[in-house]
Image (spheres, rainbow, N blue to C red):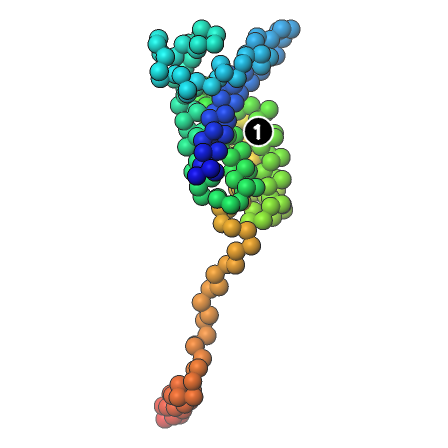
Amino acid sequence: MIELLSAVLLGLLAGALANWAAEALPERRGQLLAGRATLSAVAQGQRSVLHYLTLPWYFFRRPGGVCPHCGQRRPMRSPLLELAMIAAFVLIAWRTGGQPVRTLLLWLYAWFLLTVLVVDLEHRLVLNVMTAPAAILALAASFLPGAPAPVEALIGGAVGFGLFFLIALIGRGAMGMGDVKLSSSAGSPPPSCSSPGAPRARPPSPTRPTCASARSRSSCSWGKSWERSNLSA
């Protein structure tokens, strides 16, 4: 119960962080590309975290969606993203109970994928500032038990990058380079949710079962003799 409550609280905070990233990172990129010397308060990260933590008050305050801290109207995306983050964190904690390293790693994966999804839907961008750390995290995760080997992770990332790069070239604008770079981190899956060091089930033996008792051994010997006699006949 404590683990699930912790997952709810951390998921709420992660949702607030995702709201900040979905607003600040694309705006910061646009202002830097425009050559502006000064950045807005959102891009500089000067807003309080309470500005992005909307779920506790969004559906209960009138008029709806107006932030009680800054007076600005917040989009419906903000509380929905926090709810999605909480659901993902709780599900991961429930599936990986007693495995804190895997739980933390999968939480990071969930935060990254949900944030990238929101930024891509709202701004049609997949930012380098997010894909580069994700690729490093995917490679580092390959050293954990239950994950693909580092060589396999590198091969998977290279294959994903090459395949999506080819699609981008053939499609001529159908896919952006951000999606191509995202595929390199998606080529290495996170460790599985199974417990580390758990023995794998052995496949059934192709050989015939042995006779355990003297009676069964005699039966097996009689059967083999009968088969040989039929073959010789």
Q: Is residue 9 above or below residue 221?
A: above
Q: Nearer the viewer, residue 75 or 5?
A: 5
Amino acid residing under circle 1: Thr
Task: Give coordinates of residue 70: x percent, y percent.
Answer: 48, 7
- Assign the C terminus to one quadrant of the image: bottom left
Task: Give coordinates of residue 121: x percent, y percent.
Answer: 44, 22
Residue sitting at x 41%, y 32%: 87
Residue sitting at x 44%, y 82%: 212
Q: Is residue 85 above or below residue 93?
A: above
Residue sitting at x 50%, y 30%: 10
Q: Is residue 9 above or below residue 228?
A: above
Mark 1, Cα crowd under 10 Å, few <14 / some 14-19 / many 20+, is many
Q: Nearer the viewer, residue 162 or 138?
A: 138
Tell me, yes or no, if residue 10 can be seen here.
yes
58 sits to left or right of 167: left
40 sits to left or right of 55: right
Q: Residue furthest front?
A: 2
Residue sitting at x 45%, y 43%: 95
Tell me, yes or no, if residue 186 can be seen here.
no
Q: Nearer the viewer, residue 197 or 121?
A: 197
Q: Nearer the viewer, residue 103 or 8?
A: 8
Hey, which quadrant is residue 64 in on the image? Answer: top left
- Residue where numbered disc 1 is placed: 131
Task: Give coordinates of residue 52: x percent, y percent.
Answer: 48, 17
